[in-house]
Amino acid sequence: MRFFLFFACVIHAGNWAHGCEIKFTPPMVYVEFGGSTSANCKALCNNTEGIGWESSFGGTGLKQGLTTLDVNLKDVNDWNTAPKCYILLSNGVQDIVPLPITVYKMPKKVFMSKPPSPLMADNEYHLLKCSVHDVAPVNRLVISWHKGDKMVYEMKFEGADRRPVNKSVETTIIIDAEDNGKKVWCEVKLDFPADQRPQPMQSEKHELTVYYPPTFTEPENETLENVVGTKISLNCTATGNPTPVYKWDFADSTLKGMPKQNATGSIFTLDFRTPVVYKCVASNAAGERTKYFHLNQPEGNYTTMAALLGVFLTLGAVIIIIGAIFVTRNGSCALPRTIY
Ligand SMILES: *[C@@H]1O[C@H](CO)[C@@H](O)[C@H](O)[C@H]1NC(C)=O
Ligand SMILES: *[C@@H]1O[C@H](CO)[C@@H](O)[C@H](O)[C@H]1NC(C)=O
Ligand SMILES: *[C@@H]1O[C@H](CO)[C@@H](O)[C@H](O)[C@H]1NC(C)=O
Ligand SMILES: *[C@@H]1O[C@H](CO)[C@@H](O)[C@H](O)[C@H]1NC(C)=O
């Protein structure tokens, strides 16, 4: 707070001329190099004899009897121009106050170096360089880096130089899989009040090509139960850049040979015969990932089968026994009759 008051005092004091306050409108003038603008100076006291502007662009000379005066600054092509307003007081004292003025120039060109292509989505930082030529003033220069629709970094500068400068700066940005296809560029603006700010300028945009390893949508491994005797298809589809290629095999490397079904591509169809674990390796230039498919014949199935088999066997045995008894009774009773 004290700091702020100090500054307020300094700024205020700047517009004071031995007891006569001067008010500039606008309080700060922004003019493009070679361009024109105007400003007003007003004496806020009543012991004035006259007022005038001293400037190499549109100075007015002393105007007797006035307390307010405009100046038209035409074709301002001096980086160090310092127009001043002066007031002649009735006691003969002359006071001079400089007009706060900023002469600016937007760059001719903003350049961003082309990022390496392809980039790997490896969570590493990558340098992006941005260059501007011929921009002023450096202490109002703001360079920002953009990726997709986000600003990723902003850089401001210091320096008392009022003449145009060249700047070549770089920053690091992190690249991930989602950045594939996004555009990067940098933008230059001057940090002026919004209504006086020239249009920001952008570099060309570079599209990112980001390589990333295959990733499976959940689940990463799959267990398929109860698939005895059915035609099943295993889905190993993974996203990745470049597009992954797939290799199927038994997880147990001692098992030799794959079934006849198509074992290329991300979908593997087969007729299930025995419980086994299949393995699919999806790979591309950025890496490889393995997905396992456990084809189970659950224990529950065996007991059901056993129970069913048991019931059938028991039923069969009962039928045979009953049949045997029936045959024996009839046979032993009927046969002698038939024989006789
Ligand atoms: C800025 O770069 C241009 C072109 O490379 C050059 O002509 C000019 O002298 C440079 N300006 C400064 C201030 O270094
Ligand atoms: C998938 O299965 C393999 C082998 O059975 C195992 O090493 C790996 O940790 C499993 N991955 C997940 C995410 O469950
Ligand atoms: C395989 O899985 C992918 C991703 O999970 C999905 O988009 C695709 O439709 C699936 N294909 C089949 C044949 O189920
Ligand atoms: C097997 O794969 C080849 C090459 O990918 C394809 O042309 C063919 O249609 C596939 N066959 C079956 C039965 O899926």
Image (cartoon, helix red, strand yellow):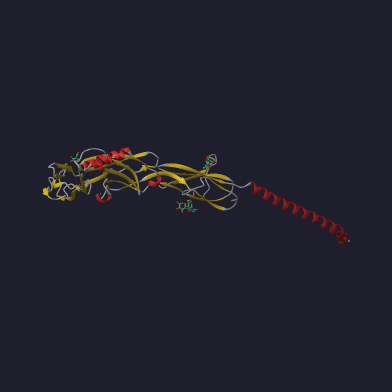
| Number of disc labels | 0
Q: Nearer the viewer, residue 12 or 39?
A: 12
Q: Indicate left or right for 51 with 211 as reference.
A: left
Q: Nearer the viewer, residue 247 or 301?
A: 301
Whether residue 102 is visible here, answered yes or no, is no
* Residue 94 location, quadrant: top left
The quadrant of the picture occupied by the N terminus is top left
| Residue 268 screen position, x and y as percent | 50, 50
Q: Residue at x 67, y 50 (%)?
A: 304
Q: Is residue 126 above or below residue 307?
A: above
The quadrant of the picture occupied by the C terminus is bottom right
| Residue 73 screen position, x and y as percent | 15, 49
| Residue 83 screen position, x and y as percent | 16, 44
Q: Is residue 95 above or below residue 321?
A: above
Q: Indicate left or right for 63 with 160 as reference.
A: left
Q: Residue at x 26, y 51 (%)?
A: 195
Whether residue 145 is visible here, answered yes or no, is yes
Q: Indicate left or right for 245 with 333 as reference.
A: left
Q: Indicate left or right for 294 with 195 as reference.
A: right
